[in-house]
Amino acid sequence: MSAAADPQAKFRYVLRLGDLSLVLGQRLGEWVGHAPALEEDLGLANIALDLIGQARLLLSYAGEIEGCGRSEDDIAYLRGQGEYLNAVLAEQPNGDFGQTIVRQVLIDAFQTELYERLAASTDERLAAIAAKSVKETRYHLRYSGSWLVRLGDGTEKSHALTQAALERLWPYTVELFAEDDLDRAMADCGLAPRLAEVHAAWDARLDDLLSLATLKRPGDRAHSWHGKRGRHSEHLGYLLAEMQHLQRTFPGARW
Amino acid sequence: MDDNRSWPLYEVFVRARGGLDHKHVGSLHAADERMAIEHARDLYTRRQEGVSIWVVPSKAITASDPGETESLFEPARDKIYRHPTFYDIPDEVKTL
């Protein structure tokens, strides 16, 4: 444990967490009105709202750390894609229901393991947000995990589609755990957990779930994604265009 | 499942607070009991309506026949002596 975190670094770290939740929540929201059953429609919307709630807490806090008077809305609606710091996995398209579930499991397990440890952060505010959020992500993982098992251990077709989604999305998970200078600095001052520790716990969880779902764990590959530094896949721009359209067209619009 | 293209129906009962009864709140479709609990949580407790959920397959419920309403329920109508309204309740008894 060393001195307190540099505010600029802390700002960027909190944005990484908040943007992950915000972008994933926005993606899930696209299912509203389109889910395979009314019950799933509400289930996915509930998760989306939890995630957007987490993003609100985190982005508000980021605005306070930055100290330039930006609100959660300014940060969400008025940043370009190069300023978004979420890992690129979150912005990947919904695809079919199986692909949405796979993306959800991968991130739910990550957030659960991260928040459980972040609840012990030396930063009290971040610790409180994590303690509140982990209750939500544990349920998200229960939901997405049980769907993963149903689809993987379901019909031949559902198994094949889910395995294909897993192969497609797995390479993006490497970025979640790729520790860079910022992650290291946050862990050094006790503000954040070591990503290696989060990774080991995530691995164990995924292995259990994949074996229950009779799915094969894809091999790890070198990654070239840097969403955490603002370099995104082609998908984020479209998502932000839709999400930010109203505030960009009618600045300051309220209802 | 009789028809594997659709999920069976479950009836949902929610207990609002400890000490109260589980009350019927509605029904939903789910593939099995676990999913039914998850759906019930998402559909019926999202505004803090409860602390406990029961789900019961709708087909496990046997209902009275509306066609027999007369013979089942009307005979009780003129038997008001079954309501214990003829007792003098002592003042010392606060709640009865």
Image: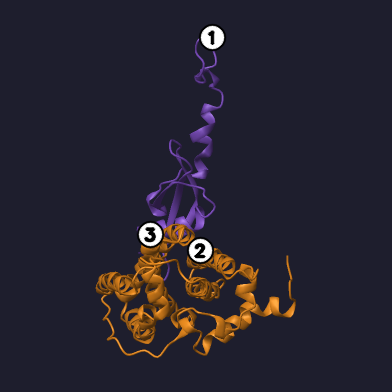
Q: Are circles 2 and 3 on residues that touch, CB within 8 Å? A: no
Q: Chain of mark 3?
A: A
Left-right relation of A79 to A224: right
Q: Which residue is mark 2?
A: A50
Q: Identify the disc placed on residue A120.
A: 3
For residue B10, above or below residue B90:
below
Q: Identify the image quadrant of residue A77.
A: bottom right
Q: CA distance from mark 2 to mark 3?
A: 21 Å
**Mark 3 residue type:** Ala
Chain that is purple in the image: B
Three-letter code for the amino acid on which mark 1 is drawn: Asp
The amino acid at mark 2 is Asp
What numbered label is drawn on residue B91? Answer: 1
Q: What kind of element bears circle 3?
A: loop
**Residue A95 appears left or right of A68:** left
Residue B69 to residue A27: above or below: above
N-term mark: 2 or 3: 2
Colour of chain A as rendered:
orange
Query: Measured from the top left, where is residue A37 in percent x and y?
Result: 49, 69
Q: How far, Cα to Cα, is label 1 from label 3?
A: 58 Å
